[in-house]
Image (cartoon, rainbow, N blue to C red):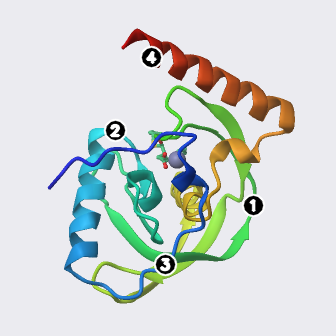
């Protein structure tokens, strides 16, 4: 297991549409282990491959209290969505920035598991939010992109200010 570096905004890779995983192999399997390790260490409840500089369609999530319900999804797609939910989101690639985001509260998601088997399941509430947040990453989208112009501008200005101070401190 290896802790991977998490890519920070405005790295270009966070704005790219990621490539589908062609086939399961040992490299992807190790990457999944390293992504879970990195996510739990952050700590976080989700992580997408482009956040660790891998431009492939792979996400890991675990929204359980005890960090014991890991879900790895390869080439995930949202097949159906319904309902509405507002949640104060953050992002490991935009540390220190939080904002309320509206998303569908119920989704039907399809993909492949780490054994290469097709999976399809329904998700609600926080699991639905987390999977949507991670699939956004695979499409080069960040949670701040769901905000209105002024809120988005203010959030990114705050991030730049926070981050510039850290850069200048070193
Ligand atoms: O993709 C990421 O950056 C990890 C995100 C996932 C996420 C954000 C907002 C809402 C749901 C999932 C977070 O940084 S994980 C951090 C976190 C921890 C507890 C609750 C919400 C977010
Ligand atoms: Zn994120």
Q: Which mark is residue 53?
A: none
Distance between mark 3 and mark 1 Cα atoms: 24 Å
Which comes sooner in the sequence, label 4 or label 3? 3
Distance between mark 2 and mark 1 Cα atoms: 28 Å
User: Left or right: 51 with respect to 72?
Assistant: right
Q: Which residue is mark 1?
A: 83
Distance between mark 4 and mark 3 Cα atoms: 35 Å
Query: Which residue is painted at 31% across and 60% down in the image?
Result: 69
Kindly tell me whether mark 2's CB lies below 8 Å from ligand 1.
yes
Q: Which residue is mark 2?
A: 43
Can residue 107 be seen here?
yes
User: Left or right: 9 with respect to 6?
Assistant: right
**Residue 141 lies in quadrant:** bottom right
Query: Which residue is painted at 41% across and 56% down in the image?
Result: 53
Kindly tell me whether mark 4's CB lies below 8 Å from ligand 1.
no
Q: Which residue is mark 3?
A: 75
Distance between mark 2 and mark 3 Cα atoms: 24 Å
Q: Which mark is residue 166?
A: 4
- What crowding class fits label 3: few (fewer than 14 Cα within 10 Å), some (14-19), or many (20 or more)? many
User: Left or right: 95 with respect to 32?
Assistant: right
Kindly tell me whether mark 1's CB lies below 8 Å from ligand 1.
no
> Which residue is most to the left?
1
Distance between mark 2 and mark 4 Cα atoms: 20 Å
Which comes sooner in the sequence, label 3 or label 1? 3
């Amino acid at each position: 297991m290896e802790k991977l570096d998490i890519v920070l905004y405005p790295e270009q890779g966070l704005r790219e549409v990621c490539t589908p995983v062609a086939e399961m192999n040992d490299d992807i399997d190790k990457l999944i282990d390293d992504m879970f390790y990195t996510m739990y260490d952050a700590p976080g409840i989700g992580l997408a491959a482009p956040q660790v500089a891998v431009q492939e369609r792979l996400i890991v999530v675990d929204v359980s209290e005890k960090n014991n319900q890991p879900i790895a999804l390869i080439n995930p797609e949202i097949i159906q969505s319904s309902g509405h939910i507002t949640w104060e989101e953050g992002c490991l690639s935009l540390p220190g920035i939080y904002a309320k985001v509206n998303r569908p509260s119920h989704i039907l998601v399809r993909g492949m598991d780490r054994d290469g088997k097709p999976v399809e399941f329904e998700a609600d509430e926080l699991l639905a939010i987390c999977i949507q947040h991670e699939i956004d990453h695979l499409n080069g989208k960040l949670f701040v992109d769901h905000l209105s112009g002024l809120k988005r501008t203010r959030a990114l200005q705050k991030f730049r200010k926070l981050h510039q101070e850290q850069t200048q401190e070193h």
